[in-house]
Amino acid sequence: MAAMAVNVGRKMPHVLTVAGSDSGAGAGIQADIKSCGALGAYCSSVITAVTAQNTVGVQGVHPVPEEFVAEQLRSVLSDMSVDVVKTGMLPSLGVIKVLCHSLKEFPVRALVVDPVLVSTSGDMLAGPSTLSGYRDELFAMADIVTPNLKEASAILGGVSLRTVADMRSAAKSIHDLGPRNVLVKGGDLKGSSDATDIFFDGENYHVLRGSRINTRNTHGTGCTLASCIAAGLAKGLPMLQAVQSAKAFVESALDYSKDIIVGNGPQGPFDHLFKLDTHAHNAGTRSFEANDLFLYAVTDPGMNRKWGRSIVDAVKAAIEGGATLIQLREKETETREFIEAANACVEICHSNGVPLLINDRVDVALACDADGVHVGQSDMPVQTVRKILGPGKIIGVSCKTPDQVEQAWADGADYIGCGGVFPTTTKANNRTVGLDGLKAVCLASKLPVVAIGGIGTANAGSVVEVNIPNLKGVAVVSALFDRECIATEARKLKSILMESSSHAKISV
Ligand SMILES: Cc1ncc(COP(=O)(O)OP(=O)(O)O)c(N)n1
Ligand SMILES: Cc1ncsc1CCOP(=O)(O)O
Ligand SMILES: [Mg+2]
């Protein structure tokens, strides 16, 4: 008898979507696969129906025979270690029964049910008989159900939902039907200036507010939100966090895509893969490369004062010594002086091919057309910075924990600053995470990481020895700027980094 193959390696978070195909690819299976891919989850697909649709509406629906839905489910669930099942269009009661049966035979970690009944164009996608299937069978197995207002109303026999208070009682009534959590989406709430959803976990209500993006390109938002929740759960996020980061993803995608033109109808799709867009918005801006983090110099006004140097001279010297990225961290510098210095530094940095970032101050970054900003957990949120600066600029965010790292990725950051790795006197009241904390952050992050805090020539080697591929460099303040000769110190530090990294995976 042939030996069974044993696969050793990295397991990808895996979402199985059980939904209909949208030929226009804005919603359905196609949206689900793109959303999961954008969030780093593998997405397999069981197709329940093939629809002919575009930006005008749904021209036709061709259900897949129930036995063949069952066969697809068996193929995927029996073999592919699915973490989370997400449902979309389930066109008949028979398909719902087949799905429930398969889930009992092949249990998964979580079930996300998006009760798709009507398309955004108003076309019916599931017969009324499916309502009993949802209510009597599928909801009881669901970890979360995500109806919009129309769907919540249909599930509850046509109740009218006009206010946030109505949404709360709908969430409670749907919860009584069996799911562990309910998200009632208020995107269609009349007269509301934002996109308020109600999340209910059986004990607590959470009002989740988001911005309403003014765009025609909203086709597929429901499928995308549910898929992002599923991807978050597959990656191990707790439910509320998965919902929040899914909401953030949808908002960013809508915002990026508000002007794109696909099709001539009233409801366009949006770009799920906006994070890959490095060309359209980047004209004139140098794109970010992770290796820029290698020797990251962060300025300090107190140190410059102590050594009698201007910001500009300090930056020049750091570049002369080989700094690969400059951050102006000018906490006490007056705004006008800051902008003047930043303008001069942009010129110097750009003529040397070194990107320049501004600490905290998005306004200063805009004023001097810097390459980006670095923000911390209590500064302006990354999503807001991204909205203001656009996709072409670099955004770094300070993270001490895997949860913060996950959020930074979902919010559209480019890199993570992790620290203080060692104790430092440069930043007051800053918890030291140590090399172990740095390791945990690197392992959790799909983004490149730069280590910061108490790093200098004596310990830079030990940071490099952490030896995790996405750890790309060290950020230093006092080791350069609180020294007599900045250029000399930068050269020393760089040669230590290069020497240590020739044995490890950190790279120039
Ligand atoms: C590269 C890098 N990493 C972390 C920080 C710290 O940022 P933040 O947490 O916002 O603290 P302040 O620098 O604003 O005091 C950083 N500046 N750079
Ligand atoms: C800004 C900052 N964020 C975390 S530690 C730190 C200070 C790093 O300064 P130094 O390199 O002098 O320890
Ligand atoms: Mg800050």
Image (cartoon, rainbow, N blue to C red):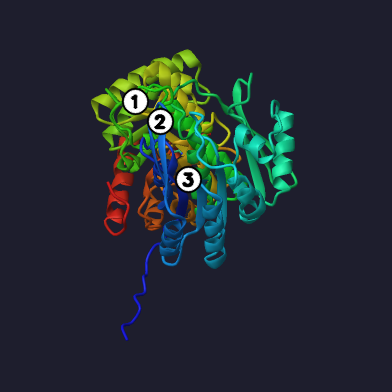
- Residue at the limit of the structure toward the bottom, as seen here: 1
Q: Secondary structure at mark 2?
A: loop
Decide if residue 409 is in sight here. Answer: yes
Residue 418 circle label: 3
Dividing the picture into quadrants, the one containing residue 109 is bottom right
Residue 407, position as x, y percentages in the image: 52, 42
Residue named by callout 1: 263
Q: Is residue 469 above or below residue 328?
A: below
| Residue plotted at (46% across, 13% down) | 336
**Mark 1 touching mark 3, by CB under 8 A?**
no
What's the residue at 27%, 23% (across, down)? Answer: 283
Distance of mark 2 from mark 3, alpha carbons? 37 Å
Please identify the quadrant where the N terminus is shown: bottom left
The kind of secondary structure element at disc 1 is loop
Asked whether the viewer can see residue 483, the reply is: no
Q: Respond yes or no on whether mark 3 lies under 8 Å from ligand 1.
A: yes
Amino acid type at image mark 1: Gly
Closer to the camera: disc 2 or disc 3? 2
Between the residue at mark 1 and the residue at mark 3, the CA separation in whole angstroms equals 44 Å
Instruction: From the image, tell me which residue sits under label 2.
Output: 269
Query: How many residues crowd mark 1 within 10 Å: few (<14), some (14–19), many (20+)?
Result: few
Q: How far is disc 1 from disc 2 in space, using C-alphas?
A: 9 Å
Closer to the camera in the image, 422 or 366 = 366
Q: Please, what is the three-letter code of the amino acid marked with disc 3?
A: Cys
In percent of width and height, residue 462 lies at 40, 56
In the image: residue 402, left or right of residue 488: right
Sooner in the amino-acid sequence: mark 2 or mark 3: 2
Of the image marks 1 and 2, the number of the one nearer the N terminus: 1
Are the residues at dot 1 and dot 2 in contact (C-beta closer than 8 Å)? yes
Comparing 35 with 448, the one in front is 35
Question: In the picture, residue 324 is in which quadrant?
Answer: top left
Earlier in the chain: of badge 1 and badge 3, it is 1
